[in-house]
Image (cartoon, grey):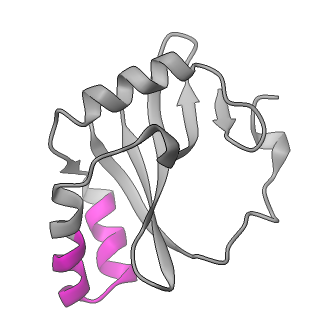
Amino acid sequence: MRYHKKIKFEHKTELKKLVKKLNNRNFSFSKHCIEKMKNRIDNDQLEKTLYMLKDLKVNYEDIFEYYHNGKNIFKIACRFQYNYIQDIILLISNNKKLITVYFNNKSDNHKTLKAELYAS
């Protein structure tokens, strides 16, 4: 089941425990994640971004979406400041593997959010 902060956000205790667990681990990167980053930013920015992500800590407040399979949370989506124009969006597995990374303009306020895709 998919949950979004603007619609329904349950499992708060479980999310907070997951954040603590994730912050005790280093990120690893899926092949898909690296390929997507290479397609979206130049090599100089890629190196800077990977360096930034190396020490990034997740806060509960950064999570805007998560996926729950009925037993546990298996991935989360977080938004962080990237630069003065964009935020970086990370889809992270429950073992701190970056599944994918994309960039949104800071002005993106999800007017196109499809509520029917989420638990309500």
Image quarter hosting the C terminus? top right
Q: Which residue occupies 16% across, 36% down?
A: 25
49 versus 62 height, above or below: below
70 versus 4 height, above or below: above
Q: Does the magenta stretch mainly form a helix, a strand or a loop?
A: helix
Q: Which residue occupies 27% across, 43% down?
A: 97
Q: Quadrant of residue 38?
A: bottom left
The answer to which of 42 and 58 lies nearer the viewer is 58
Q: Which residue occupies 78% across, 38% down?
A: 7
38 versus 81 height, above or below: below
Q: Quadrant of residue 37?
A: bottom left
In the rendered image, residue 65, in percent from the top left (x then y), is placed at 59, 42
**Residue 38 falls within the magenta-colored stretch:** yes
In the rendered image, residue 1, in percent from the top left (x then y), is placed at 65, 26
Q: In which quarter of the image is residue 104?
A: bottom right
Q: Which residue occupies 81% across, 64% down?
A: 112
Q: How many labels does the image show?
A: 0
Q: In this view, does 103 lie to the left or right of 95?
A: right
87 versus 16 height, above or below: below
**Residue 13 falls within the magenta-colored stretch:** no
The answer to which of 62 and 111 lies nearer the viewer is 62
Question: What range of the chain is rendered magenta?
Answer: 33-49
Q: In this view, does 19 lie to the left or right of 61?
A: left
In the rendered image, residue 73, in percent from the top left (x then y), is placed at 48, 24
